[in-house]
Amino acid sequence: MHRIFFLIALYAVVPLFANLSLASEVSIEEEKYTQKTVYKQSGQLRSRLSGYCKKISEDRYLLKEKGQGDYGNFTDILWDFESLMTLKSDVLCPLYTECIIRDRNSSQIFACKKEYDYDKKKIHITHRNKGNKIIKKITYPLKGNTTDFAGVVYFLRPKINAILQGEKIRFYLLSSEPGLYKVKAEFAAEEILIVGSKKIDTIKIKTTPNMGIFSGIARAMTPPTFLWYKKSPPHVWFKYEGLESGKDSPHIVTTVEEITPLF
């Protein structure tokens, strides 16, 4: 679901889930949703997408999305996102994530795949061009709990109650530059959102990247990033506000238009 310079740019994934939290706080069997993204300042439509997340075996979850519109540096395009996640040592980890950008004729323009090797503690990133030829390979260390742009909303879901109690959640974000950043998520406010004809009590979460001595500069140069979740379990995500995919990307607002099940 979209989303970031999380901030310096959201493009990678490793949701963190304890077994108990996954069962009681997240409770995912299958969720379907549609989203709309607009420019923060003008409210002009930027993109739409539809997707689902479902449990496909005892310990594996599949997340798939299809979008259209503008995204990153691409305009008037289609894209497909897929992430396979597995429950591993009480943590829901990505096995791989892949994003494919296509033109309106459905021809590939660009593709990026991220593969997670938990035995060797490495993240392998492969970029391909419109001819599906490899144009770049990058490897990063897998340092700890790590997430990217679609899985991050599932990463935080089992932590909502802890955040409500004042806990700060720290994790790594693999961004689209690409780069690996430490991120902190913390309580910002409780708000009521209108979704369709329903009023939803939500918790608003603020995320902040830790860039060492440059953190102050980064905060001054970029808008804050916020996510809204339903306050009560299973803490469904409803809204995102922040940069879309990097430090030079648009300031956007993404909202869920419809989700099944809603509660």
Image (cartoon, grey):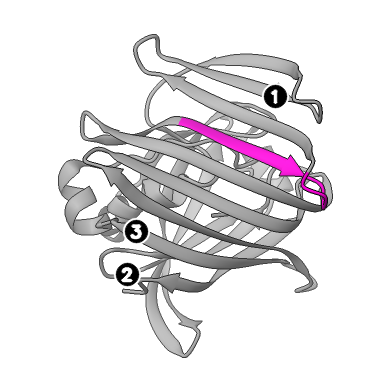
Alpha-carbon span between mark 1 and mark 3 = 30 Å
Quadrant of the drawing holding the N terminus: bottom right
Residue extent of the magenta highlight: 96-106
237 w.r.t. 194: above or below: above
Left or right of 117 in this view: 254: right
Horizontally, residue 42 falls left or right of residue 165, namely right
* 73 displayed left or right of 254: right
Q: Is residue 192 magenta?
A: no
Distance between the Cα atoms at labels 2 and 3?
A: 20 Å
* Residue count near mark 3 (Cα–Cα under 10 Å), binned few <14, some 14–19, many ≥20: some
Is disc 2 in contact with disc 1, using a CB cutoff of under 8 Å? no
210 vs 151: above or below = above
Residue for badge 3 = 30
Residue identifier under label 2 = 231
Residue 179 sits in quarter: top right
- Quadrant containing the C terminus is bottom left
Give x and y (percent) for residue 149: 55, 44
Observer-nearest of 258 and 21: 258
Say which of 245 and 260 sits in front.
260
Pick the front one: 122 or 131: 131
Secondary structure, mark 3, is strand
Which of discs 2 and 3 lies nearer the camera? The answer is 3
The residue at the point 76 percent across, 44 percent down is 102
Q: Earlier in the sequence, mark 2 or mark 3?
A: 3
Q: Quadrant of residue 177?
A: top right
The residue to which callout 1 is attached is 127
